[in-house]
Amino acid sequence: MNMKGTKVAVVGSGISGAVCASNLARNGLSVTLFESARGPGGRMSQRRENVEEGKELIGLVAIWKEKFGSFDRNSNKFVDLEQGGITSKRYVGIPGMNSVCRALCRETGVESKFGMSVGRLEWLEDENLWSLMGLDGQNLGQFKGVVATDKNIVSPRFTSVTGRPPPLDLKLVPELAVKLNDIPVCPCFALMIAFPEPLTSIPFKGFSIKNSEVLSWAHCDSSKPGRSTSSERWVLHSTMEYAQRILAQTGLQKLSDETLTKVAEELFQELQSMGLDISQPFFKKAHRWGSAFPAISVAKEEKCLWDGNKRLAICGDFCVSPDVEGAIVSGMAAASKLSEVLGSAYDNYILFMTSSSTSNLLSFALDMTYIVAEVCNMIRLRRIIPNVGSKLLSS
């Protein structure tokens, strides 16, 4: 089959969807990418306040050359990770973490539609096509294949959050639905704070927090390469247990301003109580990250969920591993599946990624240099990424 110009849809513009869309377009497919948010990024997103809240320690453009440590809440002492023998290169996108996704979504052959939610996916048996509709029933087009990057596409969680039925009818893909029906997640709250002056009492620009019931991680976002230094901006992450406790009280619906203000105060108070000299910030805003990390992986071997008869792929970090690396690998696998069934002689690198043994794939996931280099090539950064074997520190 000559698939040049064949229309396919990708739902979601996080790193998994963006990588997938770019790969599909490079193989001659006409890709329409739908994203409910105002811009791309998913967990690599950047909010309007210009303080990044998503997965902070992966990037493809510059090395984040700062010191990182760990803080023990019991002893109220810092530990230097590098002195403890834990070293790793930390890459960040510039000017923001969503820069990578944004560039991939601008690939020739990708039409990105931001602020456009997909409310329904219908399989047209006679036409052998997918029909996509918006939340209000508007026609979004017909497509030869679909890649979805949202694990809630067939989940009751979608109904809990939106009050609407899931976009994909469980009966259409029963085998996939079983795996996706109830993926447990580890929620998190992110707090964005900004100060007029540097916090000199903190010896590191990023540190994990042990033995705290409230905080798990903190980093200075303005210390990343290419960021504005007009103020010092920090991002704090709550523990999973803290987030679960709040969500048990509020449910999954949109949180009230009162609740978010309470969360912001509690997270900041925990930071202040660590014996550090920290002034009051001039900006403070909490954000719920309800599905921050999937607790299980549903397709470790296949790297994505796939229905060849209906040409439907479902990909994301929930398929491989709960991090950006896993999302990238899964997006590549989904692009490979759809391209292959539509008749493309797919790129040798991608074929290797999806057809090699599990040990080879795990090796690639652990050694991100190859994936980084591939994505850099996609967005034409033309830049050498140093230090083969460098690892990415998860939050």
Image: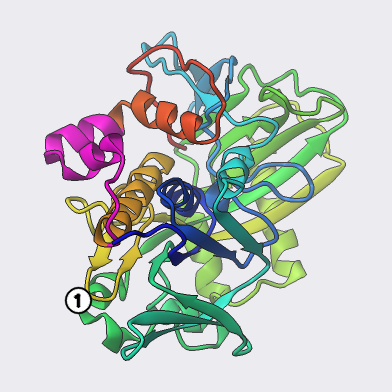
Which residue is under mark 1?
Answer: 175
Do we see residue 8 in this rendering?
yes
Callout 1: helix, strand or loop?
helix
Q: Position of residue 133 (x, y in %)?
A: 54, 83
Name the foreground residue: 134 vs 70: 134
Task: Measuring from the top left, give residue 253's x and y in whole percent.
Answer: 60, 77
Q: Is residue 80 magenta?
A: no
**Image coloring type:** rainbow
Give the residue at x 63% y 88%. Answer: 136
| Mark 1 burial class by Cα count in 10 Å: few <14, some 14-19, many 20+ | few
Q: Looking at the rendering, which quadrant does residue 32 occupy?
A: bottom right
- The reply, left or right, for residue 376 in relation to residue 352 is right
Q: Magenta span has 358?
A: yes
Would you say 275 lies left or right of 188 here? right
Would residue 308 appear left or right of 383 to someone viewing this image?
left
Q: Which residue type does callout 1 highlight?
A: Glu
Report the front residue among 393 and 62.
Answer: 62
Q: Position of residue 160 (x, y in %)?
A: 50, 82
Position of 100 with respect to 377 (left or right) is: right
What's the magenta bit mostly, secondary-structure-wise? helix
The structure residue drawn at horizontal position 47% and vertical position 53%, both measured from the top left corner, is 21
Query: Residue 146: where, in percent of width, then height?
Result: 40, 68
Whether residue 344 is situated above or below residue 313 in the rendered picture: above
Look at the picture and state if 43 lies above or below 165. above
Q: Is residue 164 above or below residue 295?
A: below
Let me know if residue 291 appears in the view.
no
Instruction: Assign the N terminus to one quadrant of the image.
Output: bottom left
**In percent of the image, x 35 and y 15: which residue is there?**
388
Viewer-nearest residue: 394 or 376: 376
**Residue reaching furthest front?**
2
What residue range appears in magenta?
342-365
